[in-house]
Amino acid sequence: MSYFKFRASACLFIISFMLVLSACATSGGGTVTESGQLTASKTTSTGDEAVTRTYESDKGTITLPEHPQRVVVAVGDYVGDVLALGITPVGAPDTVFDAPYYKKYLNGVANIGDSSALSLEKVITLKPDMIITYDEKAYENLKKIAPTVFIPYGKYQYKDRLMELGKVLNKEQEAKNCLADFATKIAEKKQALSDVIDSGKKIAIFEITGKELYLYGKSYGRGGAILYDELGLHAPEKVEKVEKAAFEKGWASISIEALPEMLGDADYLMLGIRGDGVDQGKDILSKSVWKNLSAVKSGKVYQYSIDDFYFQDPIALTYQLERISDFLVSKK
């Protein structure tokens, strides 16, 4: 080989080698333009091409997989939303396994423990490519395992939350379809309950625990979103206007002496008794202050299961809609 041919071959080799190094150095992370818009990037790993995107979370910009395959939902309140979007998480907290409407969706899903005391070891073994939470304390540890999306609880009402999770999971169209289907179900029930809704009758949500008594509004589960947002019913005026916290904050603590004032004008009552409130529940329900309430005397009290009425997502709310509608129709 001549000297000049040898030099040319060497140069071509060096140029090719530098291009490979350059490609390796720039692979892996998405690119955000100066305007802040996302541009997908492609990361090559063991021959497989993975596309990522960025998401502006409450904890800053994070890089997420374009199509997440192994999602851990670290808080029970968001599990139903993820299921409604057609994604089966690989891990979820223990609270969701008791809800009857989730059971058929949770086959093969790992129990990662109590939401407030997750098993990080279990989460690691699941090899998630995305984690979703609202727990401030757990967030710092979870983000070390996989990209973790932080969505504060209460920031969104259920519809907006589903749409936000649709954005996170790249399932925005599925979120829109899900809400449209649910709107159709609501419209059908409103038609069946039109006389109750149009009559202006009042309904209140009352819950008993081991130590406290609570009133609930429309943003803290217990069927409130169905009753007050979707069906358009109202609580007694004193609950909505005097005890404003029940509707502004989602819940309000009250005393047993306040029951006649707060619940006396209710035509219907939703009653929940927590596991630690069984004894206090028996005591209160035996007292005249409870027995003399108008809704109690007319037999228009629906005792709901805390597990069944805790969550607010299209799956849980569909179940609650059926139970509430059956109750109201039977007690017209």
Image: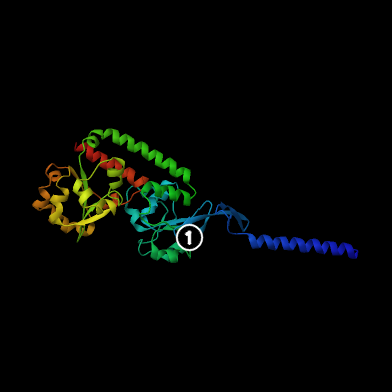
Looking at the picture, how far across and down is residue 159, in whole percent?
38, 46
Looking at the picture, how far across and down is residue 210, in whole percent?
20, 60
Q: Is residue 235 visible?
A: yes
In this picture, is 318 found above or below 37? Answer: above
Q: In this view, does 55 lie to the left or right of 204?
A: right
Report which quarter residue 19 is drawn in: bottom right
Q: Is residue 213 left or right of residue 158?
A: left
Tell me the kind of residue under disc 1: Gly
Quarter of the figure that contains the C terminus: top left
Residue at image location 28% in from the left, 40% down from the top? 232
Dot 1 alpha-carbon crowd within 10 angstroms: few under 14, some 14 to 19, many 20 or more: few
Report which quarter residue 7 is drawn in: bottom right
Looking at the image, which is closer to me, 210 or 97? 210
Residue at image location 77% in from the left, 64% down from the top? 14
Q: Can residue 87 be seen in this view?
A: no
- The kind of secondary structure element at disc 1 is strand
Looking at the image, which is closer to me, 127 or 290? 290
Looking at the picture, how far across and down is residue 38, in whole percent?
55, 52
Residue at image location 39% in from the left, 65% down from the top? 137
Looking at the picture, how far across and down is residue 148, in whole percent?
46, 60
Give the colour scheme of this rendering: rainbow
Q: Is residue 236 left or right of residue 289?
A: right
Write down the residue under mark 1.
60
Q: In this view, does 20 lie to the left or right of 179?
A: right
